Image (cartoon, rainbow, N blue to C red):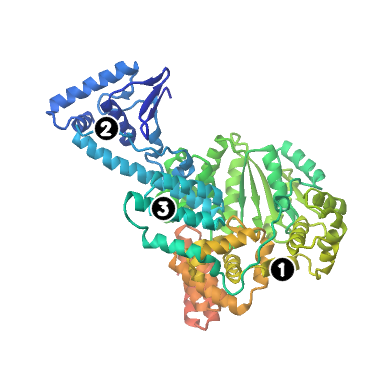
Amino acid sequence: MDWRLFVLGEVRLVGPCGPARLEKKAFGLLAYLAVEGETPKSKLAGLLWSDSPEATARANLRQLLRRLKMATGDVLVSGADPLALAASVDADVSALRGARRTELAARATELPLGRLLGQLEFDDAPLFDEWLHSARANVDAARRQAIAAAIDEHERSGRLTDALALAARAVELEPCSEDAHRQRMRLLYAAGDRGEALAAFQRLRTMLGRDLGIEPSRATTELAREIARSAEQRGPRSAPPARAIPLSVLRPPELVGREEVWARMEAAWAAGQAIIIGGPPGIGKSRLMHDFLNAVARPFFFTARPGDRAVPYGTHARVYSEMMVKIDAAKLAPWARAELARIVPGLGQAPGPMESEADKLRMLQAKVEAHRLAAREGYDAFGFDDIQFVDAATAEAGQYVMEQLFQDPTVKLRAVLCYRAGELPEAIMAAIREGVAFGLGIHIELDPLPPAGVRQLLGSLDVPGIADMADAITSYAGGNPLFVLETVKHVIASGTLSRAEVARMPPGRIGVVLERTLSRLSEPALQMARVLALLGSNFTLASASAALEASAAATAACWAELTAAHVVHGMGFSHDLIGETVLATLPRPVEVLLRRRLAVALEALGGDPALVAEQWRGAGEPCMAGRKLMDAATSSRSVFLPREAAVFYERAAEAFREGGDLVAASEVFKMRDRLLQPAGAAV
């Protein structure tokens, strides 16, 4: 671009030789074309000279275009009729024009905050002035949408610092918007800064009183009150002050004891092979994958989570939602964006239900196109963690996508996959063995660290006295890095940094350590952890708040406590083993109560019927589960997943039979059989 047009905030036009001096209506014309796009001359003339006869208005427009060309020495408005902004002009407002929610979210931090056409007013052009007021409102709304979308994305991913930065930007954009101030107060509180959340309320109150002569609304005042009294809302058992865990313990600065494995991975990478890493929980698969890929490539990182298997395409919906934030989705062909909207609603309107194998293939090809675009934008690898949790539909789609990409000479894509030993389906393990036999990849089974590796790990933590306890910690935790670090956290939290503290720990290894971590939580925070364990990857703060009947402030307080205790990270457990420990220690009566509440809450929030069914089944209500499984089968048929639909029908029939409704069970089995009957067969 040769020219930069700034119409948000201070109005100016900057060319190859610096700023150009333009009259007010020239800036108005350029701004209109930047916002609205191609426009007939008659409409532009009528807007800018509404009080003049049509012939005079057209002549005035011709003169304005001539003066604009003389002032810049260039043609900035192209076309005979209609007119459009020339391709050589890059307008700051163009980023908002026609962009979708996900595209806006990706650029939220880059959008200028100024008002459209700054302080310019057009009292001498009433129709243009009317348009300007409307356009200013639309631009502000688009920016709000961009910032809100980005805040939602950051909050879902647990990036509260990024969410807070954008919330402050939203307040700067609309200083009098109580919605923006409430959002910032809630995020501050969720991040553990209760004092700043209350200070933000006081600043808002002062500003509203000084500038508008009003008090904050009831909703804002109630939120402030909830935050102020939150310390008293933690239930009968409050959490004791947590001892600070050094950052080096949360993420050790060095990857130790994996030099030989790293060398194997480098050799495989040089040979263009995929890398598959297996091992028990906590052995260090994820850390090894992240460190290696960040050292040799520009990667995407994806993770399957407990709970993904309950919903067809559950894993892929999250994977492609994360991809769309990082790549420029606007560059995808319209058909591909529309197909991906089936699993990423933010991309726009999805097509109708898939009714044939060709429809399904078209959606799979759209996923291939997303990866090709990512490759063109410089991404050359991906790491996929915990693939044992991937749902069947995602696994099938992923296999197709990878086959297409690996056969495409224009795409240089490498992969590192991690899984828990003993938890992958045999069919996938067989495929891995076959791929290794053909030289397409290598398979690494991570072993525990030797005693020397544990001592090296402890020495890297920079915790005074901890290296002297290496023998005792190795004896208790073995060579599993996670077990070692959780033991160190427990020793620090106990306040007694000594071998004796480790010696006093009962047998049972990591489970005992994690149970003690959970025992330090307040009752509301423990209930929140239980909800997270029951929902897995489908957890949201909204569903937890509804199921626990907790206010927004109380929900944020619980999440802040879980984060401070290192029980959660992002929007999930710090490690799957913590979630498994929560479930293992969950009393059955409490589980039944929570599952019933979750079923009701998820349905009210429009949750996937398969997830609702899972909660009803776990609560001992098989007929309720059966009805929701029927809905899940219908949903699967709408995206042409007949096998998944048949499985849902079968599960529904079994649920009805378990609940004693044999008539319903028989009817559902017939529906399954009709679905599986070959096309054209006699009925």
Q: Type of residue at label 2? A: Thr
Label 1, secondary structure: give it. helix
Closest to the camera, between mark 1 and mark 2, is 1
Which mark is first along the chain, 2 or 3? 2
Q: Which mark is residue 204?
A: 3
For the point 55% across and 35% down, the residue is 376
Q: Residue at x 50, y 78 (%)?
A: 623
- In 3D space, how far apart are the residues under numbered discs 1 and 3 (Cα atoms)? 42 Å
Question: Is the C-beta separation of discs 1 and 2 under 8 Å?
Answer: no
x, y (%) of residue 317?
A: 52, 54
Q: Position of residue 174 (x, y in %)?
A: 38, 46
The C terminus appears in which quarter of the rendering? bottom left
Q: Quadrant of the N terminus?
A: top left
Label 3 Cα crowd, 10 Å radius (few <14 / some 14-19 / many 20+):
many
On the question of residue 236 being in view, the answer is: yes
Q: Report whether 300 appears left or right of 104.
A: right
Label 2 sits on a secondary structure element that is: loop
Residue type, numbered disc 3: Leu
Judged by depth in the image, the label closer to the viewer, 3 or 2, is 3
Front of the two marks 1 and 3? 3
Residue under label 2, please give it.
Answer: 39
Instruction: Give the residue pinned by disc 1.
Output: 516
Q: Is residue 338 visible?
A: no
State the residue at coordinates (18%, 25%): 58
Where in the figure is residue 206, as x and y percent of width and height? 40, 52
Quarter holding residue 94: top left
Q: Amino acid at mark 1?
A: Arg
